[in-house]
Amino acid sequence: MPTLKYPSEQFPGPPSVTVDIPDGWSPVRVPGTLLAARRAEKGGAFAPNLVVRGFTRSAEFTIGRALAELKAFVQERPDGEMDDPFEVEIAEVPFVGVNVSWTDEKVGDVVQAHLFAGARRGQVVDLIQVTGSVGGPEVESEYATVQELMQTVRVTR
C-alpha cells in the first residue's frame, strides 16, 4: 500500500514567510493566520498590527480575484474606500499591493495596506496575503511603521 506524505515532493507545503518586527511589537496567535504581530498595547482602542495569511486556491485563481474579494469586503464598511492597486517587489518576490480604509464606530479611521503574492504549484495557487492595519487617532504616524514592517516580509519556497 503506497504512503502519502505532506509536505513531500509530490505534495509540497505552502511557502515559508518571515518578517522582522521592531522593538515594542510582539508576536500574537491569530486563528487562520500563518503569523501575526502587533505593537504592545499603550492604551488606545487599536494596536497597529501585521497579519500574514496563506491560502491554497484552484489554478484558475488570480490576484485580481483576491482584489475583488477585498473590494467587496471594504465596500460593506462605512466610508469604505480602496485605492488603485500597485506592483512592488520585495526580496525578488513580486507583490500586488493595495491600500484600503473605512470608518469604524469605535476606533475611528482604519487604514490597511495589503500585499498579495501568488505562485502556481501544479493544479493549485499558493496565495500569501500580508495585511498591515492601523486605526484611531494615530493612523498617520503608525502607518509609516507598518509600511516599513511590510517591507521586511520574505517569502521562500
Image: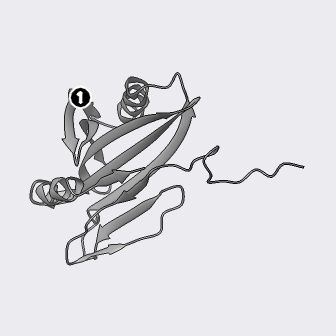
Which of these two is toward me, 147 or 7? 7
Number of callouts in the render? Answer: 1
Q: Is residue 99 visible?
A: yes
Identify which residue is drawn at 62% across, 52% down.
8
Relative image position of residue 6 (x, y in whole percent) = 66, 53
Measured as percent of width and height from the top left, residue 23 is found at: 20, 78
Q: Quadrant of residue 22?
A: bottom left
Q: Nearer the viewer, residue 24 or 81?
A: 24
The quadrant where residue 138 appears = bottom left
Look at 25% across and 35% down and name the residue there.
98
- Which residue shows up at 15% across the image and 60% down it? 145
- Taking 28 as reference, is 84 left or right? left
Image-based side of 139 in relation to 15, left or right: left
Which residue bears the numbered disc 1? 85
Within 10 Å of disc 1 (Cα), the crowding (few <14, some 14-19, many 20+) is few
Horizontal and vertical percent position of residue 134: 24, 56
Residue 10, quarter of the rendered image: top right
Kind of residue at badge 1: Pro
Front position in the image: 23 or 42:
23
* Residue 105 visible within the image: no
Q: Is residue 78 above or below residue 6?
A: above
**Vertical placement of residue 28 versus 157, above or below:** below
Quick check: 138 above or below 21?
A: above
Colour pattern: one colour
SS under mark 1:
loop
Residue 148 position within the rendered picture, expressed as x and y whole percent measured from the top left = 15, 57
